[in-house]
Image (tube, rainbow, N blue to C red):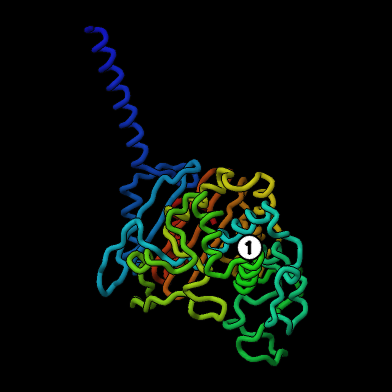
Amino acid sequence: MIKSTYLFFLFFFSILLLSCNDENKLNQIETYKDKKISVENLDQFLKTQMDSLGIPALSIAIINDGKIAYHNALGVSNTTTKQAVSKNSIFEAASITKPVQAFFVMKLSEKGIIDLDRPLYFYLLDEEMEIDQRYKEVTARMVLSHRTGFPNWRWFDNPPENMEIDRGDFFMLNDPNTTFNYSGEAYSYLSRVIAHLNFLNMNELNDLFQQEVAKPLEMKHAYSCWNEYLYDHKVFGHVEGKPKKRKWGTGLPHQNSLVFGGLQTEAKSYAHFITSIINGKGLYPETYEDMLSPYTEIPKDNVNYINDGISHWSMGFGIKPMKDDTIYRHGGSNKGFQSEMAFSINKKYGYVFFVNCEKGNEFNENLEQFLEIAK
C-alpha cells in the first residue's frame, strides 16, 4: 500500500513537472533565427510600437514550429469611445484576403469545378469587359498570379493617356499572360465566375467559402459577408488618428457588404490558415506545389521588389527568396486598416497582424527586425 501511494505521488509530481515545463515554453517565443524571446518582452515591444506609431488597436499571431505560439489583441476599437479590443475583435484583412481566396479556388479546382487554364470567358461572359476582347484570354491561373493585364481597380487607377474612356469603364494595361499587374479587379471577376459555376449568387458564395475553407481550416472568425457578429465585434478604422464611419465594401459596383468580398477576421483565425499551408493541410501535396510555384517575375522597379524583396508571385503569395529559405508574404491596405502576413514552410515559421489605422507598413518593418526576418 505504501509502495502504491509512493508510486502515485511520483507519477503525480512527474506530470506536474512536465506541465510546468510546457507552461514555461508558453512564456516565450522564438524569432526566425531561433533566438528565444520572453512573452513579456514581446508584449512590451508591441505596446511601445503602438504608442510611438499611434496605432489604436492590434491583432497579432506568431507561428513557431508550425503552431500558433503567440496570439494577442491590444488597444482600443475606437479612439473616441476608448472601447478596448478583445482577442475576438474583427479587423478588415484588405488584400491579404487574396491568399485565402486563392486557396478557395485551388480547392475547387481539385474538385473539378474550375479548370485553372480554361479562359474565364467560357464560364462567364462579362458585358462590361467586352470593350477589350483581350479579356477573353484570361484564366484563373493568370488571375491568381497577377498576369491578367487588368488594372488594380478600374475605378481608382488611371487608364493610359491614349485611352478616351470614362471613369469606371473597363480597360486593360497589358496583354494577358505577359507581365505582372497586381489586380483586385481580376480577383473580383474570378469570384463572380466561381459563384456562377456553383449556381450561387454573390451572397451565397460566402456559405460555400465557409464550407470549403473557413471551417476545415479552423478559421473561427473569417467572414466574407456582413453578419450580426460584426456589429458587436468589428473595430473602427482610423484615418489621421480619427475613427471613420463603419462602412465596408460600398465603394465599387460589384462589391458591398452583402456580397462575397474582402475578408473580415482576426489574427488567430488567419494564423490557422497559415499553419494549414505550413503543415500541408487542406490541399493535396501536388496542389500546394502548383499553388506556391513562382509564376510571375516581379519587375525590378516594382514596389513589391524594392520594398519587400519579392522576386516572383505564386498563385496567391509574393515570393521572397532568402539565402537558404523562401518567404511567402502578402500585405493589405484599406482606408483605415492595414495588415501583413509572412511565413516560411522550411522553418515552419510565420506571423500575421492587423491594425485599425494606416501605420501597418512602419510597424511591419520594426516587427520584422524584432523577429529577425532579414530584409
Percent position (x, y) of residue 249? 48, 75
Which residue is depicted at the point 65% across and 45% down?
284
Q: Please state which of residues 323 and 16 is positioned toward the viewer in this rendering.
A: 16
**Foreground of the two, 79 or 127:** 127
Visible in this render: residue 221? yes
The answer to whether 273 is drawn above or below residue 8 in the figure is below
Q: Could you say whether the residue bearing mark 1 is in a helix, strand or loop?
A: loop
**Residue at x 26%, y 67% (from the top left corner):** 83
Residue 146, percent from left and from top:
67, 67
Horizontally, is 34 left or right of 2 in the view?
Answer: right
Pointer 1: what residue?
Answer: 198
Residue at figure coordinates x 62%, y 81% from the top left: 154
Kind of residue indicated by mark 1: Asn
Query: Quadrant of the rendered structure where residue 125 is?
Result: bottom right
**In this rendering, does residue 47 appear at all?**
no
For residue 26, side relative to residue 331 (left or right): left
Q: Quadrant location of residue 156? A: bottom right
**Residue at horizontal 60%, vertical 71%?**
188
Q: Name the quarter where the C terminus is drawn.
A: bottom right
- Residue 36 in the image: state x and y as whole percent: 41, 42
Neighbor class of circle 1 (other Cα within 10 Å; few <14, some 14-19, many 20+) is: some
Residue located farthest toward the left when viewing the structure as drawn: 2
The N terminus: image quadrant: top left
Horizontally, residue 277 falls left or right of residue 64, namely: right
- Report the number of discs: 1
